[in-house]
Structures are given as structure tokens and as C-alpha cells.
Image (cartoon, helix red, strand yellow):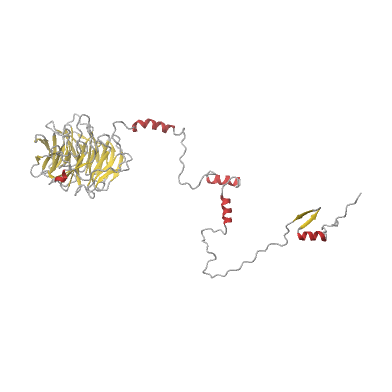
Amino acid sequence: MVSRPSSPIKRTTSASIPVSDSLQRQAGTGVIRKGGVESRLDVVTHDYVPPPKPEVKRSRSTPATSRDRFITNRDSETDVAATLDQMHLNPKSASPGHTARLVAATGVPLNRRILGYHEQPPVASSSSDSALAQHREFARPLYAQRVTALPSSIGATKTRKIPTQPERVLDAPGLVDDFYLNLLAWSTSNTVAVALEASTYIWHADTGSVSQLADAPEGTYVSSVDFSNDGAFLGIGLGTGDVELWDVEAGQKLRTMAGHLGQVATLSWHQHILTSGCGDGSIWHHDVRVPRHKVMELLGHTGEVCGLRWRADGELLASGGNDNVVNIWDGRVGDVAEGSRGSAKWTKRNHTAAVKAIAWCPWQPSLLASGGGTNDATINVWNSTTGARLHSLKTPSQITSLLWAPNKKEILSTHGFPTNALMVHAYPSMERVAEIRDAHDARVLFSCVGPGGDVVCTGAGDENLKFWRIWDAVEEKGKKKVVQGEVGGGRINSTREGILSIR
């Protein structure tokens, strides 16, 4: 048995371990030989001591650093990358408990963008929206487009071009410049009546001829005119409060209906009933068939009545006055006595100026439009069934008259100072479709639309009547199509041939 050579390390029972000189030399060189295998150790002999930084001397006025004290600066890109890596909510790298606490505290899902420009629409729930879907299904037929429906102007973003020059101009010397009067009317027989001071003239649009119909009594003037529904008769209101009835074709006065205490600024017909509005705020129904013509009196205005319109079916009557009030009356007269009085069905006080412009919609009878004077300049559209105001539009100037388009969903308004304009608005969006600025040299006071529904006649304080082609004529079955430009004698753009005179 061969004995093992003794270890170079001497074992002792003391706490310290003795090291031989050979092992100490090997450790110093970093190589330890054991059993023929060499292993190298990285031995750190000294601790690292950083070199001292030189002290920079600066003045008191020079800041210690050029960094902004509100914007954090990093010394290296490594620090920025490390910070961003710590801020990233990655469930694989971040602590699950810390991430869960952040999600619970902020209420934001883990992988959702915090800074988003648009909020995602909520997902519709079939259980919560079932009632709404059912109501929409029930209301769908109400909004369906009928085959014979009028062209709609909903969402009209483009303006429509209309001629900015009138097709005809008639000189009307003596046309009174008074906001409250109504001195222009156009009948279904295509004749235009205009009052010039104390005289009333008839202009025949088919032939272009002019004839004088009536003269007011000495000392008074004509304050209003209006044709009957068939165009055979003309009502003339006077400044004395009398109302005259004239046969247009025969040129004869049939009767004079007296009783008002002030000027009759407005008239409106329905069948055999001629309604007049007086300066004292009263409204009278005259039955032109009977000797005692006054069959009812309507009291609801404290100022002069300057706007009056019957609805086409005769069930409702609308009035506007200088007291800034719009009244809607029950038009069914029935069997009444001489002293009968009526009360308004609806009274609207939303206007802040005199209401002269009153117009019923021909294709939706429940709609009534009203326009206010200078201090109001607002168009309101009312539902005569419920009394609700459906639309309101502020305009740049005084509103003197309103006309609904007979064959299109639009409404025309005429204006006084400062624009003296004609404006066409789409319905129900109330967007401006077209505008003719400075249509007259003075404020546009009166307007009426022809029986064809395409030409509008306007009168102004500049003593001119102008005819504008605003809409297109609708061709009826079995009738000759209306040719563009046949306004008065068939002459196209007669303004180029000179201005014709009414007198």
C-alpha cells in the first residue's frame, strides 16, 4: 500500500488556515494549478476610486446649469430608455400586482390608449334599445317620401342660382312708403291690383294692359287691397275705416261697408267672408251677401292689425299686429248674430316688433310663418294644431312679407333696411338658398306670387313694381306648359325695352 504524499497545507486546529508560499504565489498571478487543470480567476486587487472632479468657478449671476428648471433633462440616452421601459405597462415585464393596481385606480383597460381623439360609440344593447327600435319602426311611414311629394330642401348645402335681375319693371308713382299698409295683390285670374295713393289700378299680366278701377273719396287714401278667391271681386280698405267691394271685370263698385274707427290696413278673403283689420286692433268678418255685413268681431290685439291671412280651408285665421302679437283664430263663423265676438285659439308673444308678415303653408296646412319688424327681424314657424313654435330664424333686417313656394319646400321673405333684399330659405332646415341684395332702391314693402307659382311681384318705396322668377312652373296635365318669360304680353325681359308705367 502506497501512502499519499502529504498536502502542502499544514492542518492545524486553530481558527486560521495556513497558506503555503507556492499557493500564495499562484493566487497572486491568478492561476491555480490543481490536478493538471488550470483555472484562471479574475482577482480584484484594489477597489475602484473615481478621479476627483475639477471644481468650476462661476459668478453669482451665472446659473449653475443651463437646463430648464421645468423640463427634465437626462444625461444619457440610456437613462431615458430605462425610464420609458419602467413606465411601459407590459404584463410580462412589469409586476402583475402593480399593473393591476394601476388599472383599478385609473379605470382604464390595460392595453387601451389613454390619449385618444375620438371616443368609441357604445355598443347597442338589444335589450335596452328594443323599445326605441320599435318606436322608430312605427314612425318610419311618417317620414317616407311619397311619390307625389314636393321636392325637399332638407340638408341643402349648395345655394340655388336665381335671376338677380327682374323680368319686368312697372313704374308705380304714388306707391305709399308705409310698412303697415298692404297695397299689392295678385288674383287667380292673373291680374295684379296696386293702390297708388287714392287710386287703384289693375294690370293684366296676360296682355300687359293697365286700367284704373277705382278712386277713393276725397280726403282719404287706399290702405289695403285683396282679391276674392276666384279673382272676380276686389276688396279695398280706406284710411277712413270703410271697406269697398268692386267687380273687377265690370269695373263697378258694388257696395261700401262702414263701421271701423281707424284705417283698414289689411284685408283677407275666404269665400263670401271678407275680413278686415283695423287700426284700433279690432278684426271684423263681413258677409258680402247680406245687408248687415258685420257678422263677427274678433278682439285680441291692443295695437293696429297689419297682417291678416285666412287658411285655404277656412278653418283658421291668423293675424299680426303692431302690439308684437300673433293670434290664431277659429275661422268657423257658423250662424252668428250681429254682435258676436270671438277669442283667439292661440296667442304668441315671441316677436319683439310689429308682425306684418303672415303666411300659411299651401302644402302643409298646419304650418304658419310670421315675421317681425326692425327690432325683431325673426321668422317663426308655428304648428297651428299644437301651438308649438317649430323653427326660428334670425335675419339681418326688417321682415315685410312672407311667401311659401306653392310647389317647393321653400319660403321667401322680403326685407327693409338695411338690405332691401329678397331671401329664399329651405324648409325645414331654414338654410339660405338664394338672396337678391338691394332688389329695390328702398325697402321692399309688399309682395305677392302669381297663380303659376313661379313669379313673385314686389313693391317698394322707390315707387317700382318688379317681377322676379324665383321658382319653376309646374306643368299640369291637359294644360299648355307655361313658357319661361311670359310675364305680361309674352315679352321676355321687358326691362331691356324700357320701364312701363302703371298710370
Q: Is residue 351 visible?
A: no
The x and y percentages for residue 380 are 28, 41
Q: Is residue 153 left or right of residue 456?
A: right
Quadrant in which residue 180 is drawn: top left
Residue furthest to the left in view is 218
Please name whichever residue, 381 or 133, is drawn nearer the observer in this view of the structure: 133
Image coords of residue 476 (percent x, y): 22, 31
Q: Is residue 306 above or below residue 288?
A: below
* Relative image position of residue 207 (x, y in whole percent): 13, 38
> Position of 440 compared to 249: left or right?
right
The residue at the point 77 percent across, 54 percent down is 38
Q: Give the camera-side residue of 371 and 55.
A: 55
Q: Residue farthest to the right?
A: 1
Name above or below for residue 448 compared with residue 271: below
Name the residue nearer the viewer: 155 or 256.
Answer: 155
Give the total number of marks visible in the rendering.
0
Residue 25 shows in the view:
yes
Which image quarter: residue 136?
Answer: top left
Does residue 285 sit above or below 64 in this rendering?
above
Q: Position of residue 192 (x, y in %)?
A: 15, 39
From the viewer's perspective, is 254 left or right of 75?
Answer: left
For the C terminus, give its image quadrant. top left
Image quadrant of residue 5? Answer: bottom right
- At a point 26% along the width and 34% down the height, the residue shown is 363
